[in-house]
Amino acid sequence: MRPVSYSRVADVATAIGVVSTDADSAFLAGGTTQVDLLRIYVEQPGRLVDINDLPLRQIDALPGGGVRIGALARMSDVAQAPLVRTGFPVISQALLLGASPQLRNMASIGGNLMQRVRCGYFRDLAAGCNKRAPGSGCAALHGVNRGHAVLGTSERCIATHPSDLAVALVALDAVVHTESSSGRREFAVDDFFPLPGETPEREHPLHHGELIVEVEVPGNPVAERSLYLKVRDRESYEFALASVAVALSLDDGMIGEVRLALGGVATKPWRARQAERVLIGAPATAERFAEAARQELQPAVSHGMNEFKIELARRSIVRALEMITADDWREQQRTTLGGAA
Ligand code: SF4
């Protein structure tokens, strides 16, 4: 392992000042992904600036029913916060299903959004990978790509975005707030994650030394009737093959507002806007759910081993909609968690 210096800072301004003036440095929060990547030489900063003492762990109610979550709040604390559990169950469920209990206790909200892809070739220094080494090719295109994306891909990269939390946040139009030596900025979370296009090495819009300080989720009455459905190879400690974040209002069998996003099948947390268009104002029927799923997956492209994901994503959308529109939808919310709660 390359030698790396370590320091611990206690305020945001100092953290930003230290990292922004040293191109060879990086912030260190929970470290649950970052330390792995250091050990295998995929990331090699010369200096780590530990930000765990920064006062960024708040989980506060906002006027209008929203919630403000500090970037260093732990996944476990946010998942169990009454404000989140009751007002935004889809967020709580995405966090509970997103990692093992040990990881949830360490991993931060900001770090969750900044985690790197789980593509095996990204972590294999002997393989071509445009994300890790721009211009070196994409070994996954004709390699082992069972877990890779079918939506939002390019000829440069087909890796799925790994965060469950981000899928729930995209569905609820959350906003990411950042701070840097140039001041504060904010990004709609959907804009925070670019498609790979020609530049898969660009995974977010942040400059070096720019720090996520908080995430705001606006109040939305439909968020209470929401759930996160995650389909994976095993019941715990596994990434999604397909996942669905859904929130909606239902009036006498008719769908009012609806929010739908997909994980595990796209190169970014995927807001399913075409499916939403099909569902808004429509009867909550199996036929309409299937049509919404069909239209959303229309542009999907497989690369061989991951072809099954197209049908899996369709079925997952239908299943999530069936669960959240059922009379016992509160019980259905609980069943998505299995043993994770
Ligand atoms: Fe790298 Fe993306 Fe290709 Fe994986 S899919 S090898 S991350 S370029």
Image: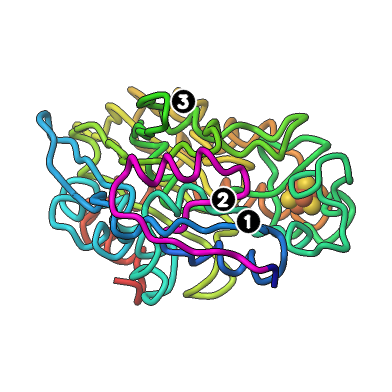
Q: Position of residue 183 (x, y in %)?
A: 37, 25
* Secondary element at image label 3: helix
Q: Position of residue 251 (x, y in %)?
A: 20, 31
Q: Which mark is residue 278?
A: 3
Which residue is painted at 14% across and 44% down in the image? 60
* Outermost left residue: 63
For the record, the magenta segment spans: 3-29
What residue is pinned by disc 1? 45
Q: Does the closest atom of ligand 1 sit within 8 Å of the Cβ of label 3?
A: no
Name the colour scheme. Answer: rainbow
Q: Is residue 112 above or below residue 37?
A: above
Depth check, front residue: 340 or 319: 340
Depth check, front residue: 6 or 178: 6
Depth check, front residue: 228 or 64: 64
Task: Choose the circle earlier in sequence order: 1 or 2.
Answer: 2
Disc 2: CA contacts within 10 A as few (<14), some (14-19) or many (>=20) = many
Left or right of residue 184: residue 114: right
Q: Is residue 118 above or below residue 165?
A: below
Instruction: Locate the N terminus by quadrant.
Output: bottom right
Q: Is residue 65 above or below residue 95?
A: above
In reply to whether residue 13 is colored magenta, the answer given is yes
Task: Choose the circle earlier in sequence order: 3 or 1.
Answer: 1
In the figure, residue 52 lies in which quadrant?
bottom left
What residue is pinned by disc 2? 25
Look at label 1 and name its amino acid: Pro
- Whole-angstrom CA distance, mark 3 to mark 1, is 47 Å
Disc 1: CA contacts within 10 A as few (<14), some (14-19) or many (>=20) = some
Disc 3 versus disc 1: nearer the observer: 1
Instruction: Tell me whether the residue at label 1 lies in contact with that at label 2, contact meaning CB atoms closer than 8 angstroms.
Output: yes
Look at label 3 and name its amino acid: Val
Depth check, front residue: 182 or 326: 182
